[in-house]
Each structure stands twice: as structure tokens, then as C-alpha cells.
Image (cartoon, rainbow, N blue to C red):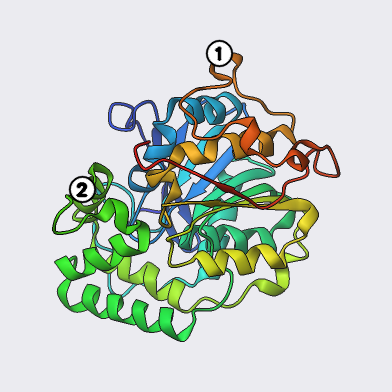
Amino acid sequence: MADSNDFVSVDMETIYLGGKEHVIPTGRGNVSVIVYGDQDKPALITYPDLALNHMSCFQGLFFCPEASSLLLHNFCIYHISPPGHELGAGPICLEDPLPSVDDLADQINEVLNFFGLGAVMCMGVTAGAYILTLFATKYRERVLGLILISPLCKAPSWTEWFYNKVMSNLLYFYGNCAMLKECLLQRYFSKEVRGSAEVPESDIVQACRKLLEERQSINVWRFLQAINGRPDVTGGLKRLKCRTLIFVGDSSPFHSEALYMTSKLDRRLSALVEVQACGSMVTEEQPHAMLIPMEYFFMGYGLYRPCQFSDSPRSPLSPSCISPELLSPESMGLKLKPIKTRVSLEV
């Protein structure tokens, strides 16, 4: 990360396909933010999972034409990277204090202040979903809605704590070694796309593996230390007043955590979508499964997809797959209920 305290705006349009990188100084270090779209539109901020950034965590969703159209038509996108996870990041100095999850949530507040943003829509994956949930509990007035993919809300179980400790030791002593990458890929993807001795791993896994090689191991280790020391935020969930849409793959190691979190949210303001034959990173493995649930979710805010993309045959869902109650206007403008998607592995 750069040591300068001055704001730096770097034009990276050729690399980020129309986006622009801003490096924002905060009281807890610099933060890289990639901005896509018209900044006069409502803001949607994203936060990726461990060892990922917007290219490796949200590219599948934003490269899906229908989803990209829905999101970019209605929002300006602010992709926030955890410290040191942005493309081309150098190693963070070992002497820099380790951030806590509260520090990371407070950084988001400073980023919003820098851009002059008010209430925003939030989208996060696993560790990123936890950071955004914590942000929502601390700054409730700044969150319009939460779209959480395979989220966390409890402190780590002994199993997760031990698994994270193994990854932490691998990162610290061996860097981005082969075993570390396998641990992360198991965290992100279902076994169907990770492949086997008989079946080669899918293109998305190969691409993710390559992107993991570019991460600075010390930077990933720092984020992992924060996540492994996270507190339970369950107590604050009932106090959330924003709408929440949760996606989780039925093969995700965090599937039970997502079900638990859904049970603790206000049922009038939340919905769960379980995606079959999918791991944690639904945004990459089955992005089309997110399209129609997001469409109905955004209808509660008066937001719609451009008509030329409506009723797309590429979506694995159709209105007949959605519970009829989902379309009933209530306090949300919609009544969202837990639903399951059935997604063909060939999609």
C-alpha cells in the first residue's frame, strides 16, 4: 500500500473495463476503490471474500449481461478491496498494526464520507458479507439494503478457527503455496467445478487459482487474522431496518451459518435463496441464479431492469419457479420467502 497520506486518483479505465481506481486515505490505512458507472446514481458497494478482490469475486456476476444491465442501470458500483487485496498491491509493512473487523467496517464509513454518499446498497461475499453486516449494525442509517452471499454472523466455531489457523500458518511461513490455494478453492467452490482425477477443474477455478498467485501472502494473512478474531454480531441483526437478501450454495461450508443468520433476521425484511450444486461464491459459480431474486428484491425500491433484457431465456429461474408470496406487496413492497433454485450444471 502507498505510504502517502494524499488522495490519489488513478485512471485505470483500460484495465478495469470502464472503471476508475481511487486510493482513499483513511485513519486505518489506504483503501482501494474501483468506481463503475454514473456517480449521480444510487451507490452499491461491494466487499469480497478473503484473498479476493472485485475481479476474482464479482466478475462472473458483472459479466453476466442481464445482471450487469440490472445493476449498472440502477447503481453506480463502488468495489472496495480489503487492504492490500487490490490488483498490483505490494506487501503491507509488517510493523503496521493489524486491523480489526471494526477497523475495516469503519474504513467503509470513511470511504462513503469521501465520496459524499448517504445510504447505500451493500453486496458482500462470506468475509466481505460479515464486514458489511457489521457496518450495517454500526451505521444503520447508511445502509439501504444488504445482498449477502454465504455470509457469516457468528464468531468462528472451533472447526473454522482451527482451519483458519492452518491457513494462517501456511500464509505466514510458506506464502501462497499449493496447499493454501487448495484450502481457499474449497472455501469458494463446490466440488463439481473444482474437478477430480477424472474431471478437469472448470475455467472459473483455473482463473481464480491464477489470480490467487498475485496476492501478497502477508496482506491475506492480515485480513485472515481480523476475520478469525471476529465477534458475534447476531445480537444486532434484529435491530437492522434494511432489507436483506441472502444467497448460499448448498455445497458451501458456510451453508448452516447462512441458515442461522436468516433465522435471526426480521422475517418481514429478509429472504434466503439456496442455490443447488454451488459452493460459497455464487457470484462466480452460478451468477445467473442471482438474477431474478435480485430483480424482485430491487422492485421493493422501485428499481427495475431495462425492458430489453426482461424474461431472459438465459436465466435458470422463471417467475413460475418463484413462490407466489414473493410477489405480494407488504412492508417491503415485496414479501420475500426462503426459496431454492434448481440450476443446471451446464449453465
Q: Is residue 162 above or below residue 204?
A: below
Q: Which residue is mark 2?
A: 206
- On the image, the x and y values in percent for residue 75 come to 58, 31
Marked residue nearer the N-terminal end (1 or 2): 2
Res. 97 in view: no
Q: Secondary structure at mark 2?
A: helix
Q: Residues within 10 Å of mark 2 (few under 14, many from 20)?
A: some
Residue at the image position 50 percent from the left and 47 percent from the top = 46
Amino acid identity at mark 2: Gln
Residue 96 falls left or right of residue 291: left
Mark 1 touches mark 2? (CB < 8 Å)? no
Residue closer to the observer: 347 or 155: 347
Where on the picture, by quarter, is residue 296?
top right
- On the image, the x and y values in percent for residue 34 come to 42, 39
Q: Which residue is mark 1?
A: 308
Residue at the image position 30 percent from the left and 77 percent from the top = 168
Q: Is residue 42 above or below residue 101?
A: above
Give the residue at the far top of this rendering. 308
Q: Is residue 2 above or below residue 67?
A: below
Residue at the image position 66 percent from the left and 58 percent from the top = 136
Residue closer to the observer: 138 or 296: 296
Amino acid identity at mark 1: Gln
Q: Secondary structure at mark 1?
A: helix
The quarter of the picture where the C terminus appears is: top left
- On the image, the x and y values in percent for residue 325 come to 77, 42
- On the image, the x and y values in percent for residue 122 come to 59, 47
Q: Residues within 10 Å of mark 1 (few under 14, many from 20)?
A: few
Where on the picture, by quarter, is residue 166?
bottom left
